[in-house]
Amino acid sequence: EAQVTQNPRYLITVTGKKLTVTCSQNMNHEYMSWYRQDPGLGLRQIYYSMNVEVTDKGDVPEGYKVSRKEKRNFPLILESPSPNQTSLYFCASSPTSPGGQPQHFGDGTRLSIL
Amino acid sequence: AQSVSQHNHHVILSEAASLELGCNYSYGGTVNLFWYVQYPGQHLQLLLKYFSGDPLVKGIKGFEAEFIKSKFSFNLRKPSVQWSDTAEYFCAVRLSSNTGKLIFGQGTTLQVKP
C-alpha cells in the first residue's frame, strides 16, 4: 500500500530537548515536504526536498532542520524545541515531474512543547 | 511577500445548496493552483489542480474550480453539497514550475447541515 508514514503520531516534551520526527514514503517519490498546521493559519511549509541531498527552505524554517540522505526518508529535527513549535505537523511526498505538488500526506504528528 | 487568501473562514450550508469558496493569490508570475480537502481527523487529499489549459478544471467528488488570471483567483465550486462534504478546504499556490515551494491559504471550514 502506497503511504507516507510519520512517527511519532503524538509527542509531549519539554523546551530544549532535541527531538526528531521521522517521515518515510514507499512510493519512490523524489519530492518530500514538511508542513505545520495551526488554527487560523492553514498549512505553512517548513522545508522541502526535490531529491536526495537537495533541500530548501519553505515559509517557516526557523527552528527546524531536515536531511535527505536517502530517497524514502525525510526526518524533521527540532534541535531546541520551544513552545511556539507546538503544532500539528504533516509530511508529504509526490513524484517530481512537473515539479512537486504534494499528493500523498502522512497522518500527522501532534507535538506539544511545554 | 506572496500570499494566498481564502475569504470565507467558516461556511454553513444546508444539503443540496450550491457552494463557492473564494481563493485569491498575490503573485504576478506563472502559478500552479490546487485545492485540498481535509475531512475531520484525516490528512489532506488533493481535490483538483490547475497547471495550464482550460481554466475550468474538474476534480473528484463533483468539485470544480475556475482560474481567472485577471483576478488572480481560483474559486472552488460544487452545485449541490452533501453532508459528507463537511470538511476543511485549503487553496494552495505553487509559484513557478521550478520550485517545490507551496503556499497555502488559511483554510475554510465547511459545515453541511443534513
Image (tube, coloured by chain):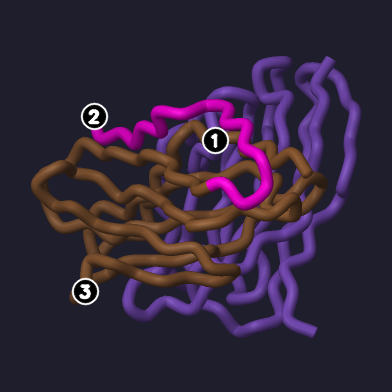
Magenta stretch contains residue B5 = yes
Residue for point 30% across, 50% down: B74
* The C terminus of chain A lies in quadrant: top right
State the CA–CA distance, disc 3 to disc 1. Answer: 25 Å
Residue found at x 65% / y 83% = A27
Quadrant for residue B94, please give it: bottom left
Q: Nearer the viewer, mark 3 or mark 2?
A: 3
Q: Position of residue A46 (x, y in %)?
A: 51, 41
* Mark 3 lies on residue: B54
Residue, disc 1: B108
Query: Chain coloured purple: which letter?
Result: A
Give the drawing colour for chain B.
Answer: brown
Answer with left or right where residue B15 lies relative to residue B105: right
Q: Which residues are magenta?
A: B1-17
Q: Residue at x 57, y 23 (%)?
A: A40
Q: Quadrant of residue B72?
A: top left
- For this orientation, the residue located farthest to the front is B16
Q: Is residue B78 above or below residue B110?
A: below
Q: CA distance from mark 2 to mark 1?
A: 22 Å
Residue in the foreground of this view, choosing between A50 and B58: B58
Separation of marks 3 and 2 at Cα, in angstroms: 28 Å
The mark nearer the N terminus, 3 or 2, is: 2
* Residue B73 relative to residue B12: left or right: left
Q: Element under label 2?
A: loop
Task: Work out whether B42 lies above or below A37.
Answer: below
Q: Which residue is mark 2?
A: B1
User: Which chain is indicated by disc 2?
Assistant: B
Which comes sooner in the sequence, label 3 or label 1?
Answer: 3
Q: What is the number of the mark on residue A66?
A: none
- Residue located 62% across and 52% down the image: B16
